[in-house]
């Protein structure tokens, strides 16, 4: 993996860059649609290509349980399995083990848990996480971590940060043994919302040495000012020449703020989860296609959008699909929403390159806000992300 970050302009910490992964160039800041179980829900690989996606995220925990990493390895790896020619980042499995599985015990060596599917017992270690991600053929693997919840008392946040640091070292060692030099490994900064713990976490990771760094344990319910303080702390603590990935963020207006604070990579389930609830994202805000007002509207979801759905389908038709429960409705809105996120990233990169990011950020944020609230936060079964 190579990463080349360009200089920042004086009015923002935002930057453009190029991430070279296994022969593919990804322009940053970049958004990764979430393909939880080797599928960005309802979208085919050609839909994703058409939308301009260059990298997707897949979930180690889900693919370990079904169909199993060895099955995917025997079928040629995850790229071939899901027919995806772009890059793939896999998470470590830690987040799902702690949020989805029935947790049995967090031990110095790893985590014992019961599958949320059939109750079977499993033991995940940093070494096993690296082995699963390697078997999947991931381009960017994540170190096995404990995602500190919010709120979390200082002593507990420290314990989890220290364990995450120890597991990062073991992840690095096992990754090195497995690696053919093709894939990259990112470390994950934890420490809850305690600035000194986060700085200590970052320093420990940097001393181990990773190809990139993620800011973890954020977007888990903390107030926005606290989140941005932690992101700014991460920006100050992490090396300029490595990509920074802000995990699980978020709404388009949050991505604008995170880019402004030096983040390069993003993932979020919102464009597809929102689509399943009928929430349409545009760069002028979001709305529900299920609303009565669209019943006889012949216009597109978003007149400014260049996606196939906006080119060919009316709001009236899309609303009808939701009214009668046709699965095509969520699929078409997912296609549009993912394209909207990727168009936002294209505009962000252009504004950064042209030295007008701060004005772009303010104007776009104002356009995005003042509309309907986001899609329900309650996850469906099975949960994404
Ligand atoms: Zn569209």
Image (spheres, helix red, strand yellow):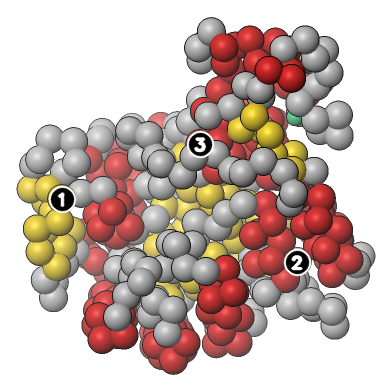
Q: Quadrant location of ligand 1?
A: top right
Cα separation, mark 2 vs mark 1, equals 41 Å
Looking at the image, residue 334 sits to the left or right of residue 126; the answer is right
| Circle 3: element type | helix
Q: Earlier in the sequence, mark 2 or mark 1?
A: 2
Q: Which residue is mark 3?
A: 273
Q: Nearer the viewer, residue 4 or 283?
A: 283
Q: Is residue 182 visible?
A: no
Cα separation, mark 2 vs mark 3, equals 28 Å
Say which residue appears at 53% left-offset and 49% top-offset. 268
Label of residue 45 in the image: none
Q: Are circles 2 and 1 on residues that touch, CB within 8 Å?
A: no
Density class for disc 2 (Cα within 10 Å; few <14, some 14-19, many ≥20) is many
Q: Nearer the viewer, mark 2 or mark 3?
A: 3
Q: Position of residue 51 (x, y in %)?
A: 69, 34
Cα separation, mark 3 vs mark 1, equals 24 Å
Q: Position of residue 255 (x, y in %)?
A: 66, 59
Q: Nearer the viewer, residue 263 or 143?
A: 263
- In the image, the residue with mark 3 has its CB under 8 Å from the nearest atom of ligand 1: no
Looking at the image, residue 348 sits to the left or right of residue 378; the answer is right
Decide: is 340 above or below 46: below
Q: Earlier in the sequence, mark 2 or mark 3?
A: 2
């Amino acid at each position: 993996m190579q990463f080349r970050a360009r200089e920042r302009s004086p009015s923002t910490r935002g930057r453009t860059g190029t991430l070279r992964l296994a022969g593919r160039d990804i322009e940053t800041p970049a958004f990764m649609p979430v393909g939880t179980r080797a599928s960005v829900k309802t979208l085919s690989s050609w839909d994703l290509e058409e939308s301009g996606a260059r990298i997707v995220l897949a979930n180690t925990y889900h693919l370990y349980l079904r169909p199993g990493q060895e099955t995917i390895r025997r079928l040629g790896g995850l790229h071939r399995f899901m027919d995806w020619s772009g890059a793939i980042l896999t998470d470590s499995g830690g987040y799902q083990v702690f949020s989805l599985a029935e947790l049995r015990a967090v031990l110095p060596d790893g985590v014992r848990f019961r599958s949320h599917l059939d109750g079977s017992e499993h033991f995940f270690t940093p070494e096993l996480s690296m082995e699963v991600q390697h078997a999947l053929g991931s381009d960017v693997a994540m170190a096995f971590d404990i995602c500190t919840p919010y709120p979390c008392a200082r002593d507990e946040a420290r314990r989890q940060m220290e364990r995450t640091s120890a597991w990062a070292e073991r992840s690095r060692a096992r990754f090195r043994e497995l690696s053919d030099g093709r894939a990259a490994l990112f470390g994950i900064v934890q420490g809850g919302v305690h600035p000194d713990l986060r700085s200590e976490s970052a320093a420990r990771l940097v001393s181990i040495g990773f190809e990139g760094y993620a800011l973890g344990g954020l977007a888990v319910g903390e107030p926005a000012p606290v989140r941005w303080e932690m992101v700014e702390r991460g920006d100050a603590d992490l090396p300029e020449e490595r990509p920074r990935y802000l995990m699980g963020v978020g709404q388009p207006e949050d991505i604008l703020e995170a880019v402004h604070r030096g983040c390069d990579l993003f993932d979020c389930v919102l464009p597809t989860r929102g689509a399943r609830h009928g929430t349409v994202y545009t760069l002028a805000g979001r709305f529900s296609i299920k609303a009565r007002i669209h019943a006889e509207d012949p216009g597109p979801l978003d007149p400014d959008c260049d996606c196939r759905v906006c080119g060919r389908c009316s709001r009236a038709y899309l609303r009808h699909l939701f009214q009668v429960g046709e699965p095509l409705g969520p699929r078409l809105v997912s296609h549009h929403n993912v394209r909207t996120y990727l168009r936002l990233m294209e505009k962000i990169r252009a504004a950064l390159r042209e030295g007008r990011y701060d004005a772009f950020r303010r104007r776009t944020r104002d356009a995005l806000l003042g509309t309907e609230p986001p899609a329900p936060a309650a996850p469906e079964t099975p949960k994404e992300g």
